[in-house]
Amino acid sequence: MKKIIIDCDPGIDDSLAIMLALNSPEVQVVGITIVAGNSPAEMGFGNAKKVLDFMGRLDIPVYVGADKPRKREYVNALDTHGEDGLGESFFPDVPGQEIPSETAIEFMRRTLKSGDVSVVALGPLTNLAELIDTDLSAFLSIERLVSMGGNFRSHGNCSPVAEYNYWEDPDSAKVVYDTLFEHGKKIEMVGLDVTREIVLTPQILDDMKQVNPVVGDFVEKITDFYFKFHWEWEHIRGCVINDPLAVAQFIDPSILQGIEAFTEVETGGISLGQTVVDSMGFYRKESNALVFTKVNKKAFWEMFLTRLLGMEASDCKVRFKEIFE
Ligand code: RIB
Ligand code: CA
């Protein structure tokens, strides 16, 4: 089992990613750290607890980190994730779940020192930049750093060129990418180029409800708002579920293919938050990022559906033939 910290901003797709990780025997989630992003940090804490409660996994500790970006004004994404940050499912708060006095950064510092813990980052990189400020050696001890964020050739979702996680806090994203470059390390960037390929459609959701009504109903409750948002803004029948793909990539690195390139994050001006991926080597700088450009969609859906629904792969291919035909 590989140990991971999930750093996230739940968040509808963050919640689906947590569900995938908790149903995957290859990973041990040693803790969840919350960062302000889709939802304000305290709301994200409560939403993580709601998902853990549904999964019967309140044993997993949740810590609260940054409540705003490194420099910019905080801009949430509740327009996309609903006023409760969980698709306006309005699940009641889980009783008796206080925010721990230990902060996300303190938890990361003491946990990462062992050197065999990875981080799957599903929100803005504010906590990781703060970790770099506070304890660089702990940050450099991260075994693998997988981040849902950024975009290479695909257009942005917050501006023509920027993806939300890196647009909401470009300064932190820049600190992380620059620090990795300075120390000869790499981030695995699961950006919009590949996550846009992962669309939960009404058909898939209906079939999920048939196969496992309890899980299907929960997924429907938290994604219904997301479906409406995607139809209204992007005329997509379905919703792009970005974050679970980062967990899937951690579990099975063959699901995504891409390029190694020096990548830097723009922090100002019209292209603020853009990941500038030097795929042609103009800057003659060593790569600090594995930037994904291709996804094996069938492999993702088989992993996601069999694990969330508790079904065999052979059965999955029959029940969800619209994916596997
Ligand atoms: O741009 C998509 C990303 O921003 C996802 O991680 C979503 O949850 C939001 O955090
Ligand atoms: Ca997220």
Image (cartoon, rainbow, N blue to C red):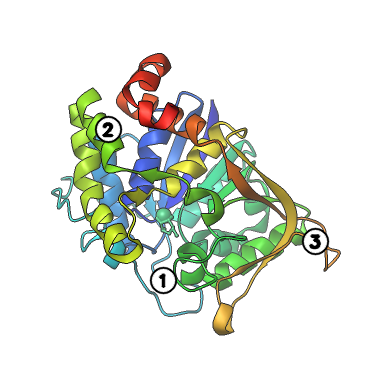
**Mark 2 surroundings within 10 Å by alpha-carbon count, few (fewer than 14), some (14 through 19), many (20 or more):** some
Residue occupied by mark 3: 280
Residue at 57% x, 31% y is 252
Residue at 62% x, 32% y is 254
Residue at 55% x, 35% y is 296
Q: Quadrant of the C terminus?
A: top left
Residue lying at the far right of the rendered structure? 284
User: Residue 187, can we see it?
Assistant: yes
Q: Amino acid at mark 1?
A: Lys
Question: Relative to 272, does residue 147 appear above or below in the rendering?
Answer: above
Q: Quadrant of residue 20?
A: top left
Task: Measuring from the top left, give residue 251's x and y in whole percent.
Answer: 54, 32
Q: Quadrant of residue 178?
A: bottom right
- Helix, strand, or loop for circle 2? loop
Cα separation between marks 1 and 2 = 29 Å
Task: Measuring from the top left, give residue 117's x and y in whole percent.
Answer: 58, 39
